[in-house]
Every structure is written in structure tokens, then in C-alpha cells.
Amino acid sequence: MTKFEKQVQYIMGMVGNGELDITMATAQILDAHNVALSDATPAIYELQTQYDSRDSFYGKAHVLTLSDGTKQLRSYETIVAEIRNGELSTFGYYSNTTLRHIKDFMYQHGFEVVPKKEIIALYDVTEKEVLS
């Protein structure tokens, strides 16, 4: 993980704790790397609901785009899923709310939304590590 990616994760932790809002977090990251906001491709964005019936995730789910193109889903303060080289991985099962975040993340990136058991069977790397 690059220095930039570590800084993004640290600042996103502050967002998750409510210590910093996403706009200020983005500004801090860009400023630390001498990148003008107008020149930046957003590395972090709030996951909006498209699949879920709720109006919003209320700032509790964010997508981080790493320098290699990997997209990570952060639910509350934890990275719970990622898409790397077109392959989805999830990292354990959490709350029902986090499951909704994962399903919306899947939907928005072209993956079929399936029930929790199938997500675990198909994509959960912690489950596969236990089985191997």
C-alpha cells in the first residue's frame, strides 16, 4: 500500500468516527499531495443508494479508489469488500446494514446481487481461507 493510500485510509477513519466530514477529508488529502481540486480525480466518494430502497446510507458507506484501480468499500470504519482486477472479494460478514452496503456496491459495479449465503460462498475470502 502506498503512502497516499495509507493516508486515505487514516483520514477515512476520521470520517467514520465523525471527526471529519468527507469534503474536508478530500481537501486534506489533495492538499497534502499538492493536487488542485480541479485537477483531481476523486479517490473517495460516498456510496449512494441505487439498489437499496432507503433514501441514503447517511454517510456510513464510502468507496475508495486506489492507485491501481482497486475499489474498496468502507462501511462505517471497516473495509468490507473490494473489486480488484474485476474480481469481487468480501471480508467477512458484519451487520445487516453493512450487508446492504455490500449489495449496493455489487449492484453499482455490475455484479449480480445475491442473498448473504451466496455472497459468502462466492466472494468471501475469509471463508475461503478457513476452508483451504
Image: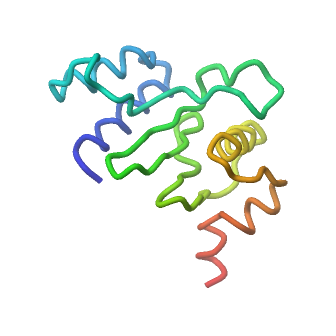
Q: Residue furthest bottom?
A: 132
User: Residue 92 location in percent, x, y?
Assistant: 65, 58
In the foreground, 17 or 12: 12
Eyeballing the image, is 113 above or below 44? below
Write the residue at 42% across / 41% down. Answer: 65
Eyeballing the image, is 122 above or below 132? above
Q: Quadrant of residue 127?
A: bottom right
Q: Quadrant of residue 116?
A: bottom right
Write the residue at 29% across / 26% down. Answer: 40
Quadrant where the C terminus lies?
bottom right
User: Residue 54 location in percent, x, y?
Assistant: 80, 23
Looking at the rendered structure, the number of numbered marks drawn on it comes to 0
Q: Is residue 31 left or right of residue 96?
A: left
User: Residue 64 location in percent, x, y?
Assistant: 45, 38
User: Residue 80 location in percent, x, y?
Assistant: 58, 49
Write the residue at 47% across / 60% down. Answer: 85
Q: Is residue 33 left or right of residue 111?
A: left
Q: Quadrant of residue 34?
A: top left
Eyeballing the image, is 60 above or below 19? below
Write the residue at 61% across / 57% down. Answer: 90
Q: Residue furthest left?
A: 34
